[in-house]
Amino acid sequence: GAGVSQSPSNKVTEKGKDVELRCDPISGHTALYWYRQSLGQGLEFLIYFQGNSAPDKSGLPSDRFSAERTGGSVSTLTIQRTQQEDSAVYLCASRGQDNYGYTFGSGTRLTVV
Amino acid sequence: AQSVTQLGSHVSVSEGALVLLRCNYSSSVPPYLFWYVQYPNQGLQLLLKYTSAATLVKGINGFEAEFKKSETSFHLTKPSAHMSDAAEYFCAVRGNNAGNMLTFGGGTRLMVKP
């Protein structure tokens, strides 16, 4: 597609439930990033995928968070046993061969009640 | 490691006044710097980027930024604010590790008064 697509745009879930957030990057972009934007914490890097290489998971805040990228394209961020502190906007970005062209999606606003 | 500091979490200007949003960076290597804008309930939109070419970078919507190595700054300016400029602005630096992740400043919310 023309841009980075994220779904759902909004998600309300009960504490303790698992959630899956989806990111569809720009076609042909090999690099994909997940960020979390929360009040008081700004924009935090979570995880990075590059092609078929092992992802850089150094930003994941706990083992409740995981992500995968299938076929080098769509990525899913999974949060298990959600907690209230997981409430945030989760942003996905992709980058092509141009090392400076980061394109962000509109994000998924997650609210844990 | 790279880092970015944005001075002023909130900036208020009158319509037609100069906009100045401050960004200072820390980097052990020549940095690549970015300014993004975020409107309510939207993602980040690239305003402009510095990639070691011209130090004065012009972006969209009349914004520009000047890279000053001696001051480790990359401040964002616009000569005349419009109401539509009200948004949150983020400065970011690209990492020089394998992932080239962006590290963001804390953001500055710009308010424009009529």
Image (cartoon, grey):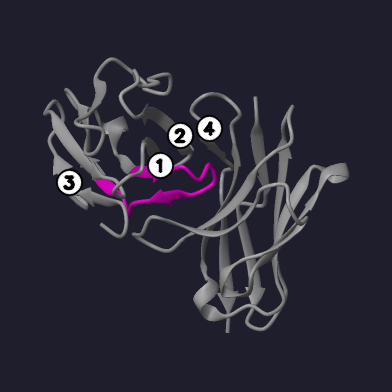
Which residue in the structure is indicated by mark 1?
A37
Q: Residue type at mark 1?
A: Gln
Which residue in the structure is indicated by mark 2?
A44
Magenta-tinted stretch: A91-109
Which residue in the structure is indicated by mark 3?
A11
* Number of the front mark, 3 or 4: 4
The crowd level at tag 4 (other Cα within 10 Å; few <14, some 14-19, many 20+) is some
The crowd level at tag 1 (other Cα within 10 Å; few <14, some 14-19, many 20+) is some
Vertical placement of residue A76 versus B59, above or below: above
Q: Considering the numbered disc 4 on the image, is that residue within a helix, a strand or a loop?
A: loop
* Number of the front mark, 1 or 4: 4
Chain where mark 2 sits:
A
Do marks 2 and 1 both belong to one polypeptide chain? yes
Q: Residue type at mark 4?
A: Asn
Residues at marks 4 and 2, CA–CA distance in whole angstroms: 14 Å
Do marks 1 and 4 both belong to one polypeptide chain? no
Q: Residue at x 85, y 45 (%)?
A: B71
Locate residue A38: give its quadrant: top left
Do marks 3 and 2 both belong to one polypeptide chain? yes
Looking at the image, which residue sits at the far right? B70
Q: Looking at the picture, how far across and down is residue A30, in whole percent?
A: 36, 37
Q: Residue type at mark 3?
A: Lys
| Viewport quadrant of the N terminus of chain A | bottom left
* A105 part of magenta stretch: yes
* A2 part of magenta stretch: no
Check contact, mark 2 vs mark 1: CB within 8 A: yes
Mark earlier in primary sequence (3, 1): 3
Residues at marks 2 and 1, CA–CA distance in whole angstroms: 6 Å
- In the rendered view, does A108 fall on the left or right side of B46? left
Q: Looking at the picture, how far across and down is residue A102, in whole percent?
A: 46, 47
